[in-house]
Image: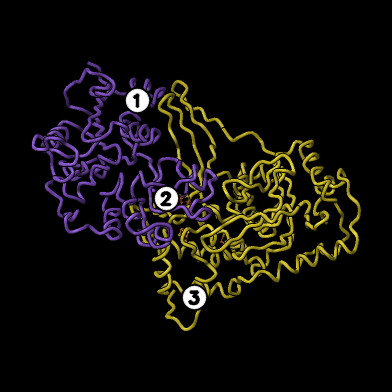
Amino acid sequence: MNEKENEPKLWLDRHELQRIFDVLIDDGYEIVGPTVEQGAIIYDRISSADDLPKGIRDQQEPGKYRLEAAGDEYCFSFAVGPHSWKKYLTPPIMPLLRVKQKNSELEIEEVIQKPQKFAFLGVRGCELAAILIQDRLWLDPAHSDPVYRQRRESSLILAVNCTTPAATCFCSSMQTGPACRSGYDVALTELKAGFVIAVGTSSGAALVKRLPLRPATQAEMDEAKQSLAHAEAKITKQMPQVDEHSKLLKKLKHPHWQSVAERCLSCANCTMVCPTCFCHSVDDVSDLNNGDITRVRRWDSCFNLDFSHASGTPIRDTTASRYRQWLTHKLASWIDQFGSSGCVGCGRCITWCPVGIDLTQEVATLLEEPVDVGE
Amino acid sequence: MSKLPRLAVVKFASCDGCQLTLLDCEDELLALGEAVHIAHFAEASSQLEEGPYDIALVEGSITTPHDVERILLLRSISRVLITIGACATSGGIQALKNFADHQEFMKAVYARPEFIQTLSTSTPISQHVKVDFELRGCPVDKVQLLEVIQAYLRGVRPKTSSESVCQPCKRRGTVCVVVVQGIPCLGPITQSGCGSICPAFDRGCYGCFGPAAATNMTSLSDNVLLPNMSPTEAGKWLRSFNGYSPVFAEESVRLWPLTLSNKSHKEGGDTK
Ligand code: SF4
Ligand code: SF4
Ligand code: SF4
């Protein structure tokens, strides 16, 4: 489990929570964290502990999400919502460069936005795993992405161990949560009276030095451990075992792809909310006023017909073929490509699918024996 | 006479909203004026020059015998013909008469219906002449309109996305109104282009841009609309600005069947 589970921890009293914000703002960080907006807990820029979703719980099921007030002091008692950190690390619409015509010369100007220094507060175990997956793509030394690298390297990660998984979560079967495993600067576990804090990096150590902390007592550490064990027990959704996934690629002709396609809208919400989906397109947008061209990168999706457009026609021209592409890439060929599954078990694609398609159930049906397989 | 390409903006049965979008371009309008010669644009100037035109932007649907003659003529004198908006592209809200008895409508609206000369249907331009490009929207989006015009000026394919409204909705960070509020939304089956405005204001998408490239109408009805509204309401909802586009029309008739006193929308074709 958590490699740092038995190391000594620190303690922050609940009424000192604001101090984290003060120190981060003092250090020039833009704090991004959970806050209630539009009926959900989203990630946005926040500046004080009052912005956190205090006493708010979420209820999630396939295609449905509701908030309710519990009226207590807990600020992190919810599961992941519609946004993920990729909103900040790979912004949905990102101008990359501008081409201007100066006399007969073309002038190319980088327009990558000003350097950002983010402190991400409230990152969950599954989300840490998702960021590490995105790192493999965007930080690959062979073709590292300057936007991602700048944002990723200057950001600080304040993770929170998840004690309140939703009914759509299955991080435990993907080995990514509910406890934070690695990839954080500090990790908090929220208890009634305050926070047990683990330090993950030297940046995290520098941060905690400036906070009013004391060593956590054994009782506090035990309570934190118990609440995580309790969370793990609450997770009932399972992804069929990972070693089964190679079998998925032997199910390419399974009739069940068509039965999913009867429900699937090909709307791409699942890929937009997925914290590991990274597909994007790059377009040149021209300005009639001055003739400038701006090159813009935006989130794209394998559910779009145009996405597989090649030689004048889409290669994946049915919803069944697009859903199959998404699921088999995410769970099977991703392993060959990046050395891990592309799914971290966050459950977002289940909750935010307008028709409530649940990939764990689709996988279970696809793997049921015996079926006519066909590669 | 200037050597600039000659642009015409021509109106058929419509509300003028799409033409207003062009006027609304303000800053870009000056640049456009330098890139083309605006030969015919009644909303902007009463000086209307005769064809031929290099680019004709057509607003509105075909609803009268006179319209049929005009569109044939316009096509014959236009090098490129682009429809702008839901009326020109799918028949518009006035295509509601295609699902009903237009005589009844006339009696309800006009004191002396015998003076009205009209077809029994409102049909898209493409049912009458070859259309080079159909720009969706009710009204069209300013950025897309400029993109289409300049793409044709440069001789390249316009970049207008055929993705669903859900994608710009997610990119702008809107929380899905279907999932959080149980509000019915046509976003998943509607083509983007508006910037996904409605869900950002707690309303479902009304389908102003017509069907997306890939649609699954029955699943949308069964899983998104019908849990929140009656089949008749759902049928009415689909039968609006783009109600006569084949994908929407078929599903709206399935949900809200035509009554005996109504004619079938498939019969309504005194065109072509
Ligand atoms: S596939 Fe679904 S459950 Fe897995 S990481 Fe993506 S959104 Fe989360
Ligand atoms: S699985 Fe759901 S969210 Fe994904 S494209 Fe299909 S309907 Fe949309
Ligand atoms: S609010 Fe409508 S357009 Fe936006 S994601 Fe949900 S279904 Fe799609």
Q: Name the residue under label 3.
A: A365
Residue type at mark 3? Thr
Task: Categorize mark 2 by other alpha carbons within 10 Å: few (<14), some (14-19), many (20+).
Answer: many
Q: Evaluate whether residue A311 shows in this view.
A: yes
- Asked whether A39 or B176 is in front, the reply is A39
In the image, farthest residue toward the bottom? A370
Q: Chain under label 2? A: B
Can marks 3 and 2 be said to lie on one chain? no
Q: Is the CB of the residue bearing disc 3 within 8 angstroms of ligand 2?
A: no
Residue type at mark 2? Gly
Residue type at mark 1? Leu
Q: Mark 1 points at which residue?
A: B23
Element under label 2? helix
Label placed on residue B266: none
Q: Name the residue under label 2.
A: B187
In the image, farthest residue toward the left? B114
The nearer-to-camera label among 1 and 3 is 1
Question: Which lettered chain is shown in yellow?
Answer: A
